[in-house]
Image: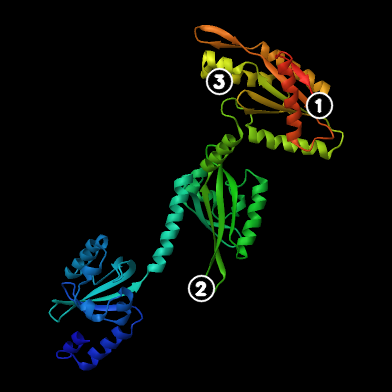
Amino acid sequence: MPFLKSLSNDESYESAERFRKIIEHAPIGMAIVALDGRWLEVNLALCKLVGYTPEELAETTFQDITHPDDLSSDLANIQRLLDNETDVYQMEKRYIHKGGWTLWVLLTASLLRDANGAPLYFISQIQDISERKRTEQALLESERKFRAIFDQTFQFIGLMTPDGTLVDANRTALEFAGLWESDVIGKPFWETPWWTHSKELQAKLREAVAKAGAGEFVRFEATHMSAEGRIHYVDFSLKPILDGDGKISLLIPEGRDITDRKALEWRLEHMAHVDPLTGMNNRRRFLELAELEFERARRYQGKNLSMLMLDLDHFKQINDTHGHPAGDAVLRKAAQACRESLRNVDTLGRLGGEEFAALLPETAGPRALQIAKRVCRVIAGTQVALDNKPPINVTASIGVASLSAGDTGVGTLLERADAALYEAKHAGRNRAMLGD
């Protein structure tokens, strides 16, 4: 180390030698840096970190390999050292490796002065924290995406003893439920107002505390009552914290309000199942529910089950003559007429276009035919009003099929109801017919 050897002219050889060995054998990067940023001495750990040989670093400055976005902060800290505002500074910064990639380091720098207080050079300690930063970045990115999708923030955080006694709660949690610290601190967590609205949740929390007290991370969905009396859905977790001896000293309860996310899930589920024009089950949802009814009827032999297939008469002509908005109004009216004519236990769905279907549990063919005829009458008595035009009169044809031994699934029942619908159309429309 030429620079340290030159120091031996003015300082004791033993002191310089000890300093040299400390730098050379340090497990982290160490360097002596001139006031203008030149590398005066570097150890092998630093060279390995940044990819340069000692000779190559000697031809550069720390400014040359510092990431441009971090340079101004670094220089500002150096100025604080020079101005004697601090004896040492520490910062996380990025270096540019010789290979061109970026690496994160934790830099600790101090300034050595002479006997008169004049600055001589900087002593830098440099630790590689790239792996830690990658881990932090991965966690931050995961959290950012989660918050961006669901728009959530932590609702509360607290501290508990391993037996579940609450010893601290943050202001967000207290204000959420309209509480004071004296209302909850020192009480079993399950007896606090966040949980007392549900005996079932209280029992679940007690079980979770027992598991967390034994070292298990616990997470489940819960509900909390707000100060306004509204139920909020919460992604709740309990995390055990170990002391220096490896024993569980604390439990950390955390909650994130997921009410908006739950509402979004429900809306998406509704959109996936419901025809947006008529409010009926869409084709996929209808067939799912129909399969369940079919299996139930098969399981309990002797249970009746009937299918109605309904098609609006001359619907294409309505669209062509009055336009699609009028056609949409007709579909909505027809859907309303079906709902009013059928029971709550019946399953309704729009299969596509002007075609509807209804599944009637515990209903035999003759009774299903009577119901279908009633639906025809209700629809025929329905008029769809138009702006400044005569109202539209609508009729429907319906095919009826009841469960038989030959039906292997909802598909075959639909096929037979569709065949009966075809017969109703050819028999003159505005009628219902029972298939074989």
Residue positioned most to the front? 426
Q: Is residue 257 above or below residue 39?
A: above
| Numbered disc in front, either 1 or 2 | 1
Label 1: how many Cα within 10 Å (few below 14, some 14–19, many 20+): some
Residue in view at x 24 percent, y 93 percent: 14
Please give left or right for residue 137 compared with residue 158 in the image: left
User: What's the coloring here?
Assistant: rainbow
Q: Residues within 10 Å of mark 2 (few under 14, many from 20)?
A: few
| Residue located beneath label 2 in the image | 244
From this viewpoint, is residue 85 visible? no
- Left or right for 162, reference 410: left
Q: Which residue is mark 3?
A: 328
Instruction: Name which residue lies at 49% across and 45% down.
Output: 150
Question: What is the distance, in whole Å, between disc 1 and disc 2 at their CAs?
Answer: 70 Å
| Quadrant of the snapshot with the N terminus | bottom left
Comparing labels 2 and 3, the label whose residue is closer to the camera: 3
Vertical side of 23 occupied by 344: above or below = above
Q: Secondary structure at mark 3?
A: helix
What's the amino acid at mark 2? Answer: Gly
The span from disc 1 to disc 3 (Cα, nearest Å) is: 31 Å
Which quadrant holds residue 390? top right
Residue occupying the point 70% across, 35% down: 289
From where the camera sits, is residue 89 visible?
Answer: yes
Q: Quadrant of residue 238?
A: bottom right
CA distance separating discs 2 and 3: 70 Å
Q: Quadrant of residue 284?
A: top right
Q: Is residue 365 left or right of residue 49?
A: right
Amino acid at circle 3: Asp
Instruction: List the residue tagged with mark 1.
Output: 363
Query: Does label 2 or label 3 sit earlier along the sequence?
Result: 2
**Numbered disc 2: secondary structure:** loop
